[in-house]
Amino acid sequence: MGAVTTIGITLASFSGAIILGLALALIRLLGLRLINVLISGYVEILRNTPVLAQLFIIYFSLPSLGIMIDPVPAAIIGLSLNGGAVLSEVFRSGLNAIHHGQREAALAVGMTPWMNLRYIILPQTWRITLPPLGNYAIALLKDTAVVSAIAAPEIMFWARNLVTSTFQTTFVYILAAILYFCLSFPLARLVERFERRQSAWL
Amino acid sequence: MSNPLLQVEGLHKNFGALKVLKGINMTMHRGHKTAIIGPSGCGKSTMLRCINYMEVPTEGHIYLDGELFGERKINDSYKIMSDKELAAQRAHIGMVFQGFYLWPHLNARDNVAIGPMRVKDLSRANATELAEAMLDKVHMSHKFEEYPERLSGGQQQRVAIARALAQQPKLMLFDEPTSALDPELIGEVLNVIQELAEEGRSMVLVTHEINFAREVADHVIFLHDGVIVEQGPPSEVLDNPQHERLISFLRQIGS
């Protein structure tokens, strides 16, 4: 049960983080000064404060503004906002790795800026950023444990409940750790395979 | 012969306070080949890049085939085109860069085919056929499947030329196409450009290869400090230069 929630939260916030991170990185490329200052402010704040604090703010403080959020959506929103900040830097360096001449060549053959993004820039960004994205997914899977603090019913939340009722502290937490391992290890192998495929292309 | 293929009218280009082009006029007819020469920093690449609006002119206008390029004239004012309109116009002009700029995630064939596929909505089969024909033209038919990083500079540049040819352009722009090449690879690229010239293609060529300009071009423009100092057929400009600056430029590059 908890494992399903863990996987669900991981998938949802990973997707959210990718969309937000890519959007932020692309908007930054437009070179609008005020917006870029706002984005880097956002990125720095989210990267330099604990996720736990961010989750508490979303879950406990927003209701005082009249916004009630359930634990799971709050966890997904929090991890997405945080991950978006982290991944926007990953995407930014991926985009920067592509020589500007490639964009010029795309425009020269008559592509619109959108076609350039779609057919020239993003396919390359994707391949460059695949390994860091994979590593982020692995880290995220384990970091979802923090959302137990806002009572999202994932693995650690169940483990803590179980400990309170059975007092089998060591046994339960080792079991929880094994469960994380069983989820994370296959993911890590998958990421490794992607990395190998990518180095064949580079 | 109705209107000229290319007309450059009162072209100025500033980068901030730096005035790079200070009033360039040029007219070229279909099937003609113009070479632009001059010392580095004279504005010759900028001039070429203004022709297809890779750089937006600060002042002046470009006409391709009698049509205003990159702008719309509304009443008496000029307005820059939308990205989409501009892209459609750029498709008529092929451009070859000093740095090749092939797309590393695509093999040689796809580098050539993707433009026609996405810009002109050709089917994959037709675009592939076109790409192979163009690669054949630049003598690269043995490397269809190869990725750019596995090609020599000369081979990459020939694929880049095939990519521009696949646009079936009215005009080809070459921006110092051999300047980034090792000496032993220059010949193969110049040969391809010469073959295209002999087919009667219209081209504007920025080059340091004076002997090549003499052979290929029917008109030479000597640019210095953002203005055209001297122009005419190569037999005049290159072999009987009048202007002090041109004489010293030709002496410097040992021609």
Image: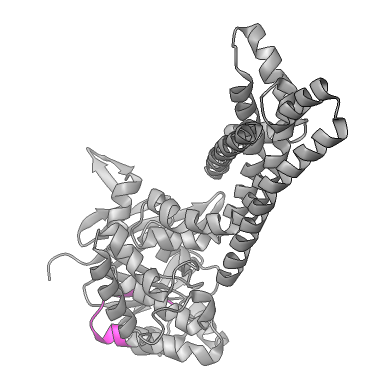
A174 is higher (above) or lower (below) than B121? above
Q: Which residues are magenta?
A: B195-206
Residue A70 colored in magenta in the image: no
Quadrant where the N terminus of chain B is found in the figure: bottom left
Coloring applied to the structure: one colour
Give residue A138's position: percent from left, percent from top. 68, 47
* Of residues A102 and A66, the one drawn nearer to the viewer in this rendering: A66
* Of residues A79 and A89, the one drawn nearer to the viewer in this rendering: A79
Left or right of B115? Residue B251 is: right
Q: Residue furthest left?
A: B1
* Of residues B63 and B196, the one drawn nearer to the viewer in this rendering: B196
Residue A18: quadrant of the picture: top right
Q: What residue lies at 57% left-to-right and 53% top-to-bottom?
A: A95
Give residue B32's position: percent from left, percent from top. 26, 77
Res B221 seen here? no
Residue B78: quadrant of the picture: top left
Q: What residue lies at 62% left-to-right and 50% top-to-bottom?
A: A133
A107 is higher (above) or lower (below) than B31? above
Give residue A117's position: percent from left, percent from top. 45, 51
Residue B205 colored in magenta in the image: yes
* Of residues B98 and A64, the one drawn nearer to the viewer in this rendering: A64
Give residue B239's position: percent from left, percent from top. 40, 90
What is the count of numbered marks?
Answer: 0
Q: What residue lies at 28% left-to-right and 66% top-to-bottom?
A: B124
Left or right of A193? Residue B246 is: left
Q: What residue lies at 60% left-to-right and 7% top-to-bottom?
A: A66
Res B184 seen here? yes
Left or right of B165? Residue A128 is: right
Left or right of A73? Residue B12 is: left
Residue A96: quadrant of the picture: bottom right
